[in-house]
């Protein structure tokens, strides 16, 4: 099977400053990759570039074997890539939870009944079917996060791009989030400052610094409590 994602020499600049500088990246079909780095390092820009929301200055974005250059190229691939934004309120726009989760299937050819069934099943799988008729703007931060994820999973994507997925998530909803991601059969790129979450979810890690990706190792140091860390790999 063709790998879902390949970036070749990808560069993005803003106001004359390089944000991404010659990024090369390949993602396996079931790989869970964490990208970590300081605030402002360009992690969100990298995710946005993958789905065509940032236009690169140079390089190629290859999705499912096809080079994407124009908006119509990306548009054809986006249903296969679920992008969880850093802020949930930027992603929720329907009045009720069930409507929001059904929106994607409805707009890609499902009937209203089929879309609502898919939404209901997805909410049940995440353990949040009790939220179905709730107003989205009245949800807690953790509930909003899971509803956003449900909207992505309802599309049956091959890849998830997750930008700080644990933002505002409490312990109970965090457990649901981890379970859903560990059960997801496709590929994941995870951007997070939550080292414990990264250590639980990711199978590989990279550090983004000075516009470039560098290999990293996921460590789980045992003290009187678990204390995961992400470290840059030493040079060979």
Image (cartoon, rainbow, N blue to C red):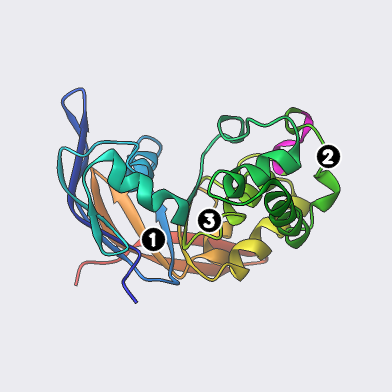
The answer to which of 223 and 44 lies nearer the viewer is 44
The residue wearing badge 3 is 195
Q: State if disc 2 and disc 3 touch (CB < 8 Å).
A: no
Q: Quarter of the image holding residue 213?
A: bottom left
Instruction: Look at the numbered discs 3 and 1 and tell me whether their residues touch, using CB distance below 8 Å.
Output: no
Q: Which of the two marks, 3 or 2, is nearer to us in this view?
A: 2
- Name the residue rendered at 74%, 46% in the picture: 170
Label 1 sits on residue: 231
Numbered disc 3: secondary structure: helix
Q: CA distance from mark 3 to mark 2?
A: 34 Å
Residue where numbered disc 2 is placed: 133
Looking at the image, which residue is at 15% across and 25% down? Answer: 16
Q: Is residue 17 visible?
A: yes
Q: Nearer the viewer, residue 222 or 116?
A: 116
Name which of mark 3 and mark 2 comes first in the sequence.
2
Q: Residues within 10 Å of mark 3 (few under 14, many from 20)?
A: some
| Lower position in the chain sequence, tag 3 or tag 1 | 3
Under circle 1, the secondary element is: strand
Q: Is residue 16 left or right of residue 155?
A: left
Which image quadrant is residue 221 in?
Answer: bottom right
Query: Can you say which quadrant of the picture contains the N terminus?
Result: bottom left
Please state the horizontal and vertical placement of residue 18, each as a whole percent of the image. Answer: 19, 35
Residue 157 on the magenta span = no
Few, some or many residues within 10 Å of mark 2 (<14, 14–19, 20+):
few
Residue at (62, 55) in percent of width and height: 154
Can residue 140 be found in the magenta stretch?
Answer: yes
Tell me which label, 2 or 1, sits earlier in the chain.
Answer: 2
Magenta residue span: 138-142
Mark pair 3, 1: CA separation: 10 Å
């Amino acid at each position: 099977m063709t790998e879902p994602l390949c970036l070749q020499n990808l560069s993005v600049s803003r106001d004359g400053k390089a944000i991404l500088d010659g990024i090369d990246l390949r993602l396996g079909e079931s790989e869970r990759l964490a990208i970590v780095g300081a605030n402002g390092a360009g992690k969100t820009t990298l995710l946005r570039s993958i789905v065509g929301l940032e236009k690169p200055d140079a390089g190629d974005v290859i999705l499912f074997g096809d080079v994407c250059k124009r908006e119509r190229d990306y548009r054809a691939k986006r249903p296969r890539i679920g992008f969880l934004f850093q802020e949930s309120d930027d992603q929720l726009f329907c009045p009720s939870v069930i409507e929001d989760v059904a929106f994607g299937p409805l707009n890609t050819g499902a009937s209203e009944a089929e879309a609502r069934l898919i939404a209901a099943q997805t909410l049940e799988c995440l353990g949040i079917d009790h939220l179905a008729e709730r107003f989205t703007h009245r949800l807690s931060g953790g509930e909003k996060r899971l509803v956003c994820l449900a909207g992505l999973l309802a599309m049956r994507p091959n890849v998830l791009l997750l930008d700080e997925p644990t933002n505002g998530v409490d312990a109970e909803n965090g457990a649901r989030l981890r379970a859903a991601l560990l059960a997801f059969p496709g590929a994941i790129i995870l951007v997070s400052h939550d080292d414990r979450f990264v250590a639980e979810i990711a199978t590989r890690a990279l550090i983004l610094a000075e516009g470039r990706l560098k290999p990293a190792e996921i460590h789980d140091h045992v003290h009187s409590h678990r204390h995961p860390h992400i470290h840059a790999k030493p040079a060979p």
